[in-house]
Amino acid sequence: MELSERVQRIKPSPTLAITAKAKELRKRGIDIIGFGAGEPDFDTPDYVKEGAINALKEGKTKYTPSAGIPELREAIANKLKEKNNVEYTSSEVVVVPGAKMGLYEIFATILNPGDEVIVPAPYWVSYPEQIALCDGISRFVELEENEGFILTVDKLKDAITDRTKAVVLNTPSNPTGAVIPKKELEKIAQFCLEKNILIISDECYEEFIYEREHVSIASLSKEVREITFTVGAFSKSYSMTGWRLGWVAAPERFIKPIINIQSQTISNPTSFAQYGAIEALKDGGKFPAMMREEFKKRRDYIVEEIRSIEGISCVKPSGAFYVFPNVSYYIRGNISNDVDFVSYLIEEAKVAVVPGSAFGKEGYIRMSYATSMDNIKEGVKRIKDALKKLS
Ligand SMILES: Cc1ncc(COP(=O)(O)O)c(C=O)c1O
């Protein structure tokens, strides 16, 4: 066999695939409205770009330390202290080329073959694939629409085995937008402490919470901080998805091996991108707040519109920029699953969405509202018209 067993375990990212398909149709002159993209539709702020441009002009174009430049590690540690209420020293922060790579490095750091990671489903598409790449096993915990897709400690209790090494928390969540309430986080943290389970807290959407404050689980106590990886990124918060920059913060016993992995794989995150990121953090959260206000308007509009469609229910998400409507009513006749439903929408409505099954939940679709209000209005109208034909 030419290919390794490891690489044969993984599938390509279905969310990137749908974005590519929409792009290809657009290239052929077909006017597609895309609800597939997992990235803000705002440009990266100019002051961030200038930070990178100045770095380029000043010749900051060489290798940096594998953990990232000290000024950026320091700035991230400060942000985590001031905004997230968690005290990390800069040596407990590693700059990573995107949260995605950071998560992969965490799994590579903690998993031995056969170790289990609890993954609440619906989940972000890359967790199970990365866990499999690192020889681990995903134990899925089903989250339910009638519970707002919120993870509870009782669900964790049901999933634990003697091989459980860690649990992935993603709050706010991609794809559901669910936010785990502080009270539940406290119970989850207590349980993980008692059972010796590490916490991987993916907080990429921390800036997009609409009715309450974001809570970093590591902020709950010193003991919780000791068993937690706090993962964040510039990607969504500062509309810097293409820059590939994020961070992992954790006790040094975990950060050191992650830095070793980086030193033997990527060497370092891109030098001039890191200088841009320093400027992003200097804005004190103004840019994300601007996006948050806009996303909230869009969320309110899209939820109401989707709920007005016959047969569709939709939880109002508290965070991120996705809705996750239940479309199982339309899964009948020629449409035998959510993938068929998504194909029907692309062909009939010229609208691109992602099937729930890509996130481990059949019968749903994920729609990103990180697209203009005009697109949302037109896209929803097209969906309504296409579904009327099925009713
Ligand atoms: C939940 C979640 N975690 C991590 C990532 C990866 O972020 P990055 O672009 O910083 O690698 C994404 C991106 O879609 C995401 O939705």
Image (spheres, rainbow, N blue to C red):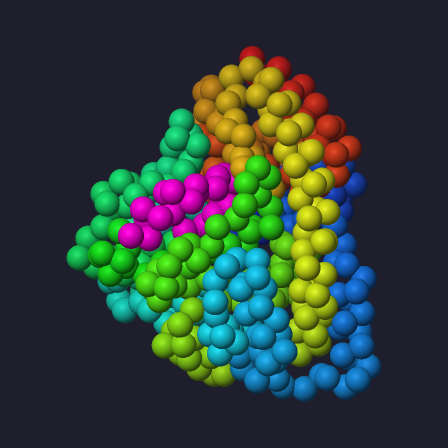
375 is higher (above) or lower (below) than 382: below
Q: Residue at x 79, y 41 (%)?
A: 29
Left or right: where 34 falls relative to 203 = right
| Image height of 324 relative to 219, above or below | above
- Quadrant in the picture for the C terminus: top right
Q: Position of residue 184 (x, y in %)?
A: 37, 43
| Residue 223 appears anywhere in the view | yes
User: 307 above or below 233?
Assistant: above
Give above or below for 7 relative to 295. Answer: below
Picture coordinates of residue 118 (x, y %)? Answer: 32, 52
Left or right side of 194 for 10: right
366 relative position to 225: left or right: right
Q: Residue at x 27, y 69 (%)?
A: 112
Q: Nearer the viewer, residue 141 or 226?
A: 226
Q: For the magenta stretch, what is the residue range?
A: 169-190
Say if the magenta span includes residue 177: yes
Q: How many marks on residues?
A: 0
Q: Residue at x 57, y 21 (%)?
A: 307
* Residue 387 covered by magenta stretch: no
Quadrant that contains the N terminus: bottom left
Whole-percent x, y for residue 115 in the image: 26, 62
Q: Check the image and name the residue furthest to the top.
A: 391
Q: Which residue lies at the image location 55% right of the left edge and 70% below the top edge?
A: 77
Q: Pick the residue in front: 147 or 220.
A: 220
Q: Could you tell me if residue 386 is visible in this image?
A: no
